[in-house]
């Protein structure tokens, strides 16, 4: 918090010195939103994050309740009743979650627990994996106490998608690389635990595996991005994370429950040189609290 406040103060002062220069003719450059940055840190310490005290949420709710008015002869009493009813429903859903409306479970899906769900499409049958995927899969099994024969080759059934607790849907290189034309890439992830060299990776495919005591886990084969460029990270005050993508040279198997969010990895240079910078979805935490759900563009897939 202290470091963030210092950076915001530095930015605002630099902006005013560069553009405003204490000239009344340039006063219009200093917008209220710019000055508000100076209060973000202190006010968050005093009354909590700005989202909790901002008027946008209240204004949105006023608009929603206003649309529900059905009694023009007595609009204020009608508005009061609609607000009271909504508050009661919200409280009831929090006290008894089972009464809340839930989307139907897709035909091909597996609930992994903790808010994670495997989604189709998937392989119809188990199959041998590509030889380049064998070492990271063997390493994961061996590191989890599984005794493997020297010539053991994994046979598994690949899954194409996973829904996260944030309601984002993570896809895979396996399926996205089959598509032609413009494809919305959503196979890059941020992991809640450090995997190999970095915190970001590209999912090749998902699969399930059974271990000792019949424990079945949902797993992901991930191509891990290199650690960020230290100079760019330092010069950008830790805002610009630029990593090198090494594809099949940095494969690792992780537990699906380690995936925290889906992110965008955007080419850093033109022409592309193998480096990508991270873009996380803004407001994701608040959207998750409000029950926001990502639209499933593969819902009409016959294998989904």
Image (tube, helix red, strand yellow):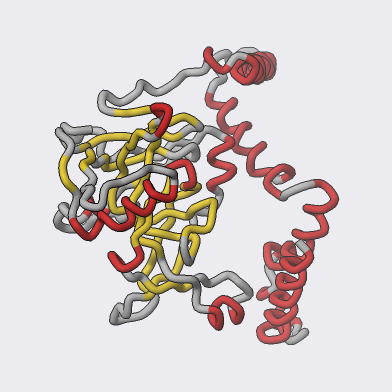
In which quadrant will I find the C terminus?
Answer: top left
| Above/below status of 115 relative to 225 | above
Q: At 77% from the left edge and 47% from the top edge, which residue is drawn?
A: 48
Given residues 279 and 216, the one toward you in this image is: 216
Relative to residue 218, is residue 189 depicted above or below? Answer: below
In the rendering, at what x and y percent does residue 81 appear? Answer: 66, 14
Relative to residue 159, is residue 165 drawn left or right?
right
In the rendered image, which quarter is residue 28 located in? bottom right
Taking 54 as reference, is 179 left or right? left
x 35%, y 65%: residue = 250
Residue 75: tell me if it is visible. no
Q: Nearer the viewer, residue 138 or 269?
A: 138
- Which corner quadrant holds the N terminus? bottom right
The mark tally for this picture is 0
Residue 225 in view, yes or no: yes
**Residue lying farthest to the right in this orientation:** 46
Q: Nearer the viewer, residue 242 or 36?
A: 242
- Residue 202 pos. (x, y %): 35, 58
Q: Position of residue 155 (x, y in %)?
A: 21, 42
Residue 138 sits above or below residue 223 on the image: above
Q: Residue at 34% of width from left, 28% of height from top?
A: 110
Q: Determine whether, in the image, residue 99 is placed left or right of residue 14.
A: left
Quarter assignment of residue 71: top right
Residue 151 in the image, given as x and y percentages of width and height: 21, 51
């Amino acid at each position: 918090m202290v470091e963030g406040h210092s950076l915001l103060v530095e930015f605002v002062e630099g902006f005013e010195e560069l553009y405003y220069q204490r000239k009344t003719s340039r006063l219009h450059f200093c917008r209220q939103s710019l000055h508000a940055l100076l209060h973000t840190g202190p006010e968050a310490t005093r009354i909590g994050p700005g989202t909790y005290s901002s008027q946008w949420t209240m204004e949105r709710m006023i608009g929603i309740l206003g649309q529900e008015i059905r009694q023009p002869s007595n609009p204020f009493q009608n508005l009061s009743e609609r607000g009271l009813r909504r508050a009661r429903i919200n409280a009831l859903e929090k006290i008894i979650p089972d009464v809340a409306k839930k989307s139907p479970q897709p035909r091909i899906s597996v609930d992994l627990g903790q808010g994670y769900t495997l989604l189709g499409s998937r392989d119809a049958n188990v199959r041998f994996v590509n030889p380049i995927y064998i070492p990271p899969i063997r390493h994961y099994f061996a590191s989890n106490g599984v005794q493997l024969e020297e010539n053991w080759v994994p046979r598994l059934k690949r899954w194409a998608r996973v829904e996260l607790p944030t309601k984002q849907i993570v896809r895979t290189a396996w399926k996205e690389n089959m598509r032609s034309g413009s494809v919305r890439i959503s196979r890059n992830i941020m992991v809640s635990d450090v995997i190999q060299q970095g915190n970001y990776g590209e999912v090749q495919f998902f699969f399930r595996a059974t271990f000792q005591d019949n424990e079945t886990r949902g797993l992901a084969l991930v191509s891990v991005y290199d650690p960020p460029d230290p100079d760019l990270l330092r010069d950008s005050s830790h805002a610009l994370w630029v990593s090198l993508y090494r594809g099949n040279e940095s494969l690792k198997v992780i537990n699906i429950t380690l995936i925290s969010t889906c992110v965008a990895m955007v080419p850093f240079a033109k022409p592309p040189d193998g480096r990508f910078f991270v873009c996380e979805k803004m407001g994701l935490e608040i959207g998750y609290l409000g029950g926001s759900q990502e639209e499933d563009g593969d819902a009409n897939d016959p294998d989904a």
